[in-house]
Image (tube, rainbow, N blue to C red):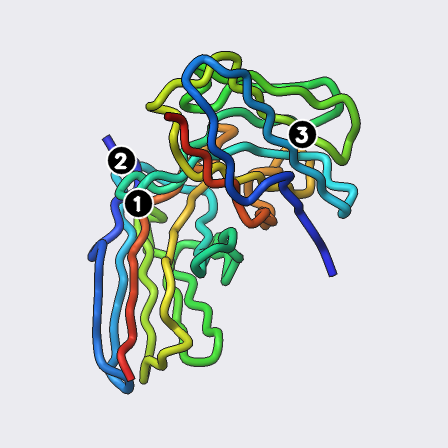
Amino acid sequence: TQLLEQSPQFLSIQEGENLTVYCNSSSVFSSLQWYRQEPGEGPVLLVTVVTGGEVKKLKRLTFQFGDARKDSSLHITAAQPGDTGLYLCAGTIQGAQKLVFGQGTRLTINP
Amino acid sequence: DVKVTQSSRYLVKRTGEKVFLECVQDMDHENMFWYRQDPGLGLRLIYFSYDVKMKEKGDIPEGYSVSREKKERFSLILESASTNQTSMYLCASSLGGSDGFSYEQYFGPGTRLTVT
């Protein structure tokens, strides 16, 4: 059973479109991170959110942490081919010395 | 420029062989981690270490062991490789402390291991 469920697992859209990726759990997280991984490389941190309801923006990327700290979303506006990659959410479960990862969302932006 | 390096990008081993995967970080980080990454399963934690000579089991430690003799180096050992250990192996490091898992993890490029 996956503690963090990401959806969709695959997404292929045209350049210029908007998209949202979701990361859901029944567990409460003390913090949640989003990483992007490109082929042949390790994941690279995009953002960390720690407060319920928190919204962070990174250029065209908007990250939100749910009020109950059980879910998160990543919204990309006007997607570009450079956004192509595997997006991973990862959370620290309250009371546990552990970082758990979602399965990932493989995003392809077509020119 | 911070760096986590892994000894090999690609490795092919035979069933039953002993396999060593090496990871080195140059950031003086206390925490180091070994994950395996499989399609549809994300990253799963094998072992982690929060100090020299210290190690803790992750979610899937069976069939693996680790060694951390120096702060900058964390080794993953497959005592007797099996085909179900064919995977991408990722090493990571982060700052330590009681909330060490909330800190950014810096990953190496990964080692794609194939066991035949």
Q: Name the residue tied to disc 3.
A: B74
Q: Please determine if labels 1 and 3 lie on a single subunit.
A: no
Residue visible at 41% across and 24% down? Answer: B59
Q: Mark 2: which secondary structure?
A: loop
Q: Mark 1: which secondary structure?
A: loop
Q: What residue type is labelled 2?
A: Gln
N-term mark: 2 or 1: 2
Can you tell which quarter of the image residue B85 is in? top left
Q: Name the residue tied to disc 1.
A: A103
Q: What residue type is labelled 1?
A: Gln
Tell me the quadrant of the picture where the N terminus of chain B can be found. bottom right
Q: Position of residue B62 (x, y in %)?
A: 43, 14
Tell me the quadrant of the picture where the C terminus of chain B can be found. top left
Q: Which amino acid does label 3 sit on?
A: Phe
The image's mark for residue A2 is 2
Left or right relative to A45: residue A7? left
Residue depth check, mark 1 versus mark 3: number of the one nearer the observer: 3
Residue visible at 44% across and 21% down? Answer: B14
